[in-house]
Amino acid sequence: MIPVSIVIITKNEALLIGECLKSAALITDDIVVIDSGSTDGTLEIARQYGCRIYQENWEGYGANKNKGVALAHYDWILSIDGDEIADRRLIRSLHNLDFDDPRIVYDIKFRSYFGKKPIRFGEWGRNHHVRLFNRSQIKWAKAKVHETLLLPKGTIRKKTEGRLHHFSVQNIFECHNKAIYYARLSAAQYAKNGNKASFLKLYLSPSFVFVKNYILRLGFLDGWEGLVIAKMMFKNTRLKYYYLKQYEQGKFVRDENLPHHQHLFLNIDPFEK
């Protein structure tokens, strides 16, 4: 095993968490699970793999990941999600890394899936993220959505071999629901940051996102799934600025006790009929 702790945040990940942990157990002897109220058997599966499990209230993606980082045994942290699986090439690569310099972060390639189909083009086909870092130097920003690592000056970025395989959505309905869910979270974050929903963002940005993903980045080569993903990205962009406009006009109801800090808008989805 290598001196790396794996940190996973979970809520109802039973569908894939077993495969996720099966690969994680080949990397380290310290797997930390930060769970926010799973009811589907996720925790029972995690216990089978000897994970250290902590029940925490949901405070956002970045904040909950930081909780896991603080509880890890090792300073080197590999952050993965419950629907991500390390392939054997990545596992071998991790075992051959040098962990002497805490300034280094490792950028890992992703392979995203729509159901069981690997997506090779469009935005999803280009994914890579820094997921391996030393906690003495780096932590997660406390954003509730699209969490990012705070990389100090002097950080050295390196790449690994292999991939994390991300089973993003199982079907078109999950794709649709995620577009709405993340649009709500993004709108709340934008409102907090003082962003405004301009005419260009409301009416031109969604179309640009579709064209960039489906045409310029060859998303159409992924067939039907590529079209669905491009439409989902259009919808997500359109909705997050629509909801931001609702914030600006005061047309929303806020409830901090909702799971994952979702917000209830008076008009949940203007495209739903």
Image: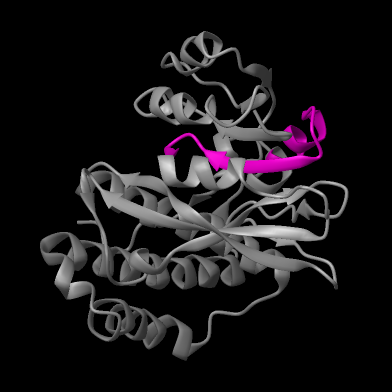
Q: Does the magenta-highlighted stretch encompass residue 56?
A: no
Q: Of 195 and 110, which appears nearest the observer?
A: 110
Side of 18 relative to 260 (left or right): left
Picture layout, residue 212 above or below residue 171: below
Magenta segment range? Answer: 65-86
**Residue most extreme to the left:** 224
Q: Judge left or right: residue 243 versus residue 269.
A: right
Q: Residue at x 43, y 13 (%)?
A: 41
Q: Nearer the viewer, residue 42 or 246?
A: 42
Q: Residue 235: give x, y in percent of width and height.
A: 32, 67
Quadrant of the rendered image containing residue 75: top right
Q: x and y percent of residue 264 in the render?
A: 50, 47
**Viewer-closest of 98 and 87:** 98
Does residue 67 belong to the magenta stretch? yes
Residue 198 visible, this orientation: yes
Tell me residue 27's x, y (percent). 57, 32
Residue 87 visible, this angle = no
Most extreme residue toward the front, as rendered?
96
Residue 87: percent from the left, percent from the top? 41, 42
